[in-house]
Image (cartoon, rainbow, N blue to C red):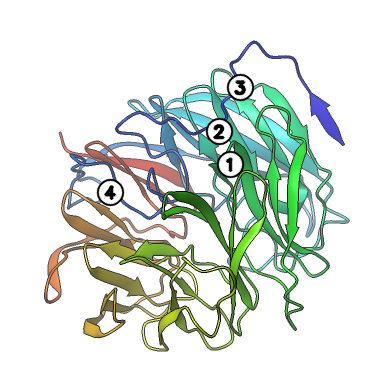
Amino acid sequence: MRRLVLSSLTLTLTLTPSAADWPQFRGPTQQGHAETGANPPAEWGPKKNVAWRTEIPGQGWSSPVVAGGRVYLTTAVPQGDGPKPDQSLRAVALDAASGKVVWDVEVFRQDGASAPGIHSKNSHASPTPVADRDAVYVHFGHLGTARLSAKDGSTVWATRELRYAPVHGSGGSPVLAGGQLIFSIDGADRQEVVGLDPGSGAVAWRTPRNANPVKAFSFCTPLVITVDGREQVVSVGSDVVMGLDPADGKEIWRAKFSGYSIVPRPVYAAGLVVFGTGYDNAVLYAVRPGGTGDVTATHVAWTSKKGAPRNASPLAVGDALYTVTDGGLLTCFDAKSGRVRWDEGLGGAYTASPLFAGGRVYLLSEDGTGTVFGPGAGYDPVATNKLGERVQASPAADGDALYIRTAKAVYRVAGK
């Protein structure tokens, strides 16, 4: 099904955030870095440095994004009681200054009786939107993708044509690159990377993974990098990582490994694409992206079984690479060599990806504990903060504010 709604909006073919925006999963760099000059508080709590708290109906683990003075996210609201109710798949816009709801619209409706099951840590609204001042692109995995007007949430286009068989639900978020809206499909029946025309929602290209994994499902978000002046979109799926031309989807290189149910978004550090291999035994891989064809035997720079995350994406700061495992082991690597510089056991469980802002690294555990530390030769803790609500979404940093989504609400953390 496709709905096309006439719009006077200028078609947004490239992402053009303002200097302080956090317009997509992991921010303007796609790698967890806030813009230069951002300086959110290092300390917060239920009654400390909270500018506002807005409850969000339903359930969703999409991360908040910020563009043009608004915060955008998605949620799934059950329609009625019972074990498998219909779900209203919604997009919500909040005023960034006040937290007031600007608009709240239904994008799709999911039939509960026929809906496939999801993992207990997942939701029906886990992929993160991409936003700018004119458009908000929302993605619900196998349930559909849409472009909304940033002004009022009205639908510009919506498509549910790219159906596939998910395992444990959906998770990977889209990215804008090469004039296309790009995301990965890693279901039980189909594994490919797809580019949509952002103006119409029509499929521009589809590139199969051709990996034939034993367990095909994954949830990874692509990463856009530039290598030797050429833009690439890097997509990790079960048993394979691929570098593609974002304009037409043509494969540039690939490397093979063993892994599935891959969640962390890769990072580009010290000239290397660094990613985790997921389950059953996570390994951290670093691959040089400058080759062509199958580069498995020639371009793998280093691997590490230690510190390999299954959910939280890595974070690169200078020549250091930071990871936090599901069980709370924080590890600092030399990004170029893979040598472990130090590690620290934080405890707790971690799903949210870390961010870097104001010269500090911010981590959020699933129980809502926020750990802030300074990057350097050893672990340098700055603050430990408690919200007392469950957190799995990754935080966003915008100027002097931090946005945290919990199971119930969105917080704006900002000094007074």
Q: Position of residue 136 (x, y in %)?
A: 57, 31
Residue type indicated by callout 1 = Thr
Mark 2, residue position: 92
| Secondary structure category for the residue under label 1 | strand
Quadrant showing the C terminus: top left
Badge 4 crowding class, 10 Å Cα cut-off, few under 14, some 14 to 19, many 20 or more, is some
Mark 3, residue position: 11
Say left or right for 154 vs 164: left
Q: Earlier in the sequence, mark 4 or mark 1?
A: 4
| Secondary structure category for the residue under label 4 | loop
Asked if disc 4 and disc 2 are in contact, CB closer than 8 Å, the reply is no
Q: Position of residue 160 (x, y in %)?
A: 81, 42
Which marked residue is nearer to the observer: mark 4 or mark 2?
2
Asked if disc 3 and disc 4 are in contact, CB closer than 8 Å, the reply is no
Badge 2 crowding class, 10 Å Cα cut-off, few under 14, some 14 to 19, many 20 or more, is many
Tell me: residue 225, above or below residue 151: below
Alpha carbon separation for disc pair 4 and 1? 23 Å
Q: Residue at x 83, y 33 (%)?
A: 2
Asked whether 106 or 190 is in front, the reply is 190
| Secondary structure category for the residue under label 3 | loop
Mark 4, residue position: 46
Asked if disc 1 and disc 2 are in contact, CB closer than 8 Å, the reply is yes
Residue type indicated by callout 4 = Pro
Tell me: residue 76, above or below residue 153: below
Which marked residue is nearer to the observer: mark 4 or mark 1?
1
Residue type indicated by callout 2 = Val
Residue type indicated by callout 3 = Leu
Q: Residue at x 61, y 24 (%)?
A: 153
Alpha carbon separation for disc pair 1 and 3? 22 Å
Can you see residue 57?
no
Which marked residue is nearer to the observer: mark 2 or mark 3?
3
